[in-house]
Amino acid sequence: MINSRTQQKKRTRRAIIDAAIGQLSESKSFAALSLREVSRQAGIAPTSFYRHFKDMEELGLTLVDESGLALRQVMRKARQRISEETSVIASSVRVFMEFTQANPNIFRILFHERSGTTRALRIAVAHEIQYFVVELTDYIKHIGFDQDAAFAQAEAMVAVIFNAGAESIAAKPAEKKALEERAVLQLRYIAAGAKSLTQTTQTE
């Protein structure tokens, strides 16, 4: 009986999260959602919402956490499937774009709330992006850069890829390939510039 209740609670919590994600759109951010409409979409009474989340802000923080985790897992898989014929940059951009197209609302949470009206969500998104930067910094360090150079590259690269992903969500199908190619080119310029700068510094 206890296990059954626990499972039901988990299913209801999941339903609330999915209902919130499902209502997001290009013109509707998380801040525009109401507790009542999320509850209705999840198939529960508004009062039942409080058995799972203290308020909408706590729900938003949960969405940010899940979205950031999902994105980092996707990018880890991208690095794992790199072959000799595929560059790190091209493979990572392709996987990132595939993720944003398959899960646009998950990406919208991170992008919209980065400059949203709720301070707690802005801070949470900033932390998720920073986690992303830190993981990329560690990877870049492993290919021969020191901490400062790796971190500077990672910050610039994450800014490029996030902007490209945000643009691709609203882009027409014919424009998506161009966005992907532009992001790859920009990231290669960043990587080439970092390599050149490091070599110059070492010879001075």
Image (tube, helix red, strand yellow):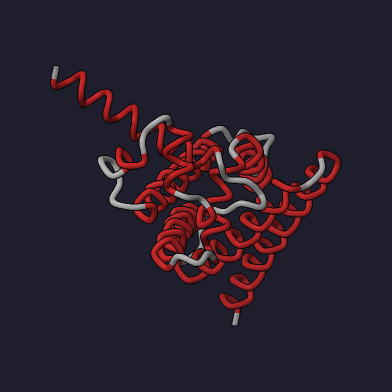
Relative side of 111 to 86, left or right: left
Pinpoint residue 178: horizontal percent, then vertical percent: 82, 48
The answer to whether 75 is drawn above or below residue 126 in the figure is above
- Name the residue nearer the viewer: 59 or 51: 51
Quarter of the picture containing the C terminus is bottom right
Relative side of 88 to 57, left or right: right
Q: Quadrant of residue 84?
A: top right
Pinpoint residue 10: horizontal percent, then vertical percent: 29, 30
Residue at image x 48%, y 52%?
139
Residue at image x 41%, y 65%?
123
Q: Residue furthest left?
A: 2
- Name the residue nearer the viewer: 153 or 126: 126
Residue at image x 38%, y 56%?
57
- Name the residue nearer the viewer: 200 or 62: 62
Q: Residue furthest right?
A: 174
Relative side of 8 to 135, left or right: left
The answer to whether 115 is drawn above or below residue 99 in the figure is below
Q: Quadrant of residue 138?
A: bottom left
Pinpoint residue 14: horizontal percent, then vertical percent: 38, 33
The answer to whether 7 is drawn above or below residue 67 in the figure is above
Quarter of the picture containing the N terminus is top left
Residue at image x 31%, y 42%?
47
The answer to whether 15 is drawn above or below residue 170 in the figure is above
Numbered label tally: 0
Pinpoint residue 21: horizontal percent, then vertical percent: 51, 41
Relative side of 115 to 134, left or right: right
